Image (tube, grey):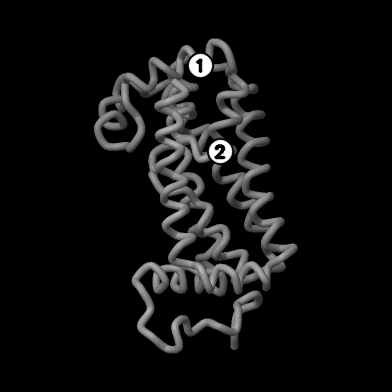
Amino acid sequence: MKREGESQGAEVGGGKKKSWVRRLYDWVLGWAEKPSGPSALAALSFAEASFFPIPPDPLLMALCLGAIKKSLRFAAIATVASVVGGIGGYLIGAGAWQALGGFFFEYVPGVTPERFQDIQAFYDRWDFLAIFMAGFTPFPYKVFTLSAGVFSINFPVFVLASVLSRGLRFYAEAGLLYWKGPSISRFIDKYFNLLAWLFVALIIAGFLALEFLL
């Protein structure tokens, strides 16, 4: 039985062997039929907000395509888990940065002492906007959650900006899939490899934009 929203052209290229990227996509899409799917989305959303380099958007979209009617529920899971993860990042920055800062600077992509100093100046002028931009755009959200705690950004402002930006981002993605699921699924099936590379490029562009703006 085909998953809801899955296009009829699942066999790409007339039965040719699928690329590893496409096989990974099919595997992730299969999580929508398993009890672990929402849990995996929550774990990834939480981790990405403070230390993990891969955003939860691909998994969110895969789950939505696998179960269109649950799209808004998946968006809620991603939003709540990401905001809670962001709060965790804030608390790390506020209370444990002396002990853990060296680890983040060495092992977490995008987290550097120089960038933190630049972000401090950004916060001094645009605290809410800085967090909102990081939560909604491809900017590395984790850099802003950690630094918000380090620089003692107003906590209610941080939470409000995180809820609005993360919610707007994830609900926009899930809402579009809920509305146009089958047709978008066919489009993704046809152009998946190109879209995968474009998504990687978008993440890289977020880091480069942060370098340019700060």
Q: Estimate the x, y position of residue 188 in percent, counting from the top left.
A: 55, 68
Q: Mark 1 highlights which residue? A: 122
Q: Position of residue 93 (x, y in %)?
A: 42, 24
The image quarter in which residue 103 lies = top left
Q: Quadrant of residue 135?
A: top right
Q: Residue at x 43, y 66 (%)?
A: 193
Give how far apart the Cα atoms at labels 2 and 1 are. Answer: 16 Å
Of residue 21 and residue 12, the one placed in the foreground of this image is: 12
User: Which class describes the residues within 10 Å of circle 2: few (<14), some (14-19), or many (20+)?
Assistant: some
Left or right? Give the position of 210 relative to 153: left
Give the amino acid at mark 2.
Answer: Thr
Amino acid, disc 1 = Phe
2 and 1 marks in contact (CB < 8 Å): no
In percent of the image, x 56 and y 74: which residue is there? 33
Please, what secondary structure does the residue beneath circle 2 have?
loop
26 vs 114: above or below:
below
Disc number at residue 137? 2
Residue displayed at 50% across by 40% down: 138
Judged from this view, the residue extending furthest toward the right is 179
